Amino acid sequence: MNQSRRDAFRSAGPAPGVKPITALRRGLEVFWSIQQSSAVTLADLHRQTGMSKATLLRILRTLQEAGWIARNEVENRYVPAASPGESGLAEEWRTRLSALASQPREQLQKVVPWPIDLAVRDGLAMLILDTNRPINGLAVNYRVLGFRPRLLLSSLGRCYLAFCPDAERRRLLAALARSPYEVDRAALKSHGAQDWPARYRAQGYASRDPSPTSLDSPERFGAISVPILQGNTVVGCISCAWLPAVASEQEIVKRHLADLKAAAQAVQSRLAAAKFPAVPPGTAEA
């Protein structure tokens, strides 16, 4: 474990003579690595932590059984669980949302040759639903970088921030400024949210800016997202990701923005017909 990670897991003021629980510290380090990477393989964790694979497998099984992480069977990667410790109502809400949106998404995927995703906000990140779907069309495995895209660094998160009510946006930005994750605080300083929410609302979609990444980086992909709305509440967002070397944002918008909006509208109609709640039962709207 490097020094920064030791500092992260060090107690603020342990009682003199009290010994730390080494196994717990190792488990926290593994969980931290999964959260930071969004989705990792066993080999990734072995390289990042230096722990043996046998030890890692025991820790991973414990974290899975406790509901803190999940395993994507298709890609053999471990991902953070959605809102660990929450009631089953939120999970049921997401499952039903995904089911109601399935037909419009399938129709959309027939006309768009790039990966399509549906995501909902989960704390200060977006949670992509149905990650077991096979990747279609995109040469880089962008979902490894985006099972839980950050609000300020993804088209999905920016879409949510742009289209949610002003009061909710202010609360989320204040929470990002206090986030325990440096990536959130750094993104707030560099990206902010002063002018682009209004611009995104005016143009009807939000985009991801791949320019900070190098030309050969696997993180260099383009993405645009549109909201699924119930009144002023953003239930979720639908995104399309593509390789900038193949098409520009302007070309994607010209070819597929109308398709994305039509799919979002179809989902909205199905949610209204089903009287689907805009937020999980027992959850505040903001």
Image (tube, rainbow, N blue to C red):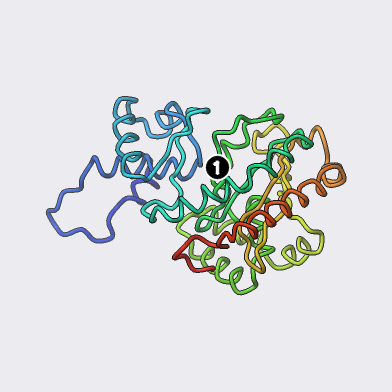
Residue 13 lies, with reference to residue 239, above or below; the image says below
Q: Nearer the viewer, residue 202 or 90?
A: 90
Identity of the residue drawn at 64% across and 62% down: 161
In the image, taking residue 172 as reference, residue 191 lies left or right, namely: right
Which sits in the foreground, 40 or 217? Answer: 40
Where is mark 1, residue-wise?
147
Please state if 258 lies on the left or on the right of 118 as rendered: right
Picture quadrant of residue 14? bottom left
* Figure label count: 1
Q: Is residue 223 left or right of residue 188?
A: right
- Residue depicted at 12% across the width and 54% down the height: 17
Label 1 secondary element = loop
Name the amino acid type tagged 1: Phe
Q: Which residue is pictured at 45% across the width and 45% down the height?
A: 35
Residue 76 spot, x, y in % from top left: 48, 28
Assign the C terminus to one quadrant of the image: bottom right
Is 135 situated above or below 37? above
**The one of 253 and 177 positioned closer to us in this rendering:** 253
Question: Going by the picture, which residue comes out furthest to the front?
Answer: 273
Locate residue 104, reporting x and y percent.
70, 44
Q: Residue 254, percent across and down? A: 87, 46
**Looking at this rendering, what residue extends furthest in the left direction?**
17
What residue do we see at 68% from left, 49% from top? 238
Examine the image and state in which quarter residue 68 appears.
top left
x, y (%) of residue 173? 58, 66
Up/down of 90 relative to 28, above or below: below
Callout 1: few (<14), some (14-19), or many (20+) C-alpha neighbours within 10 Å? many
Locate the N terminus by quadrant. Answer: top left
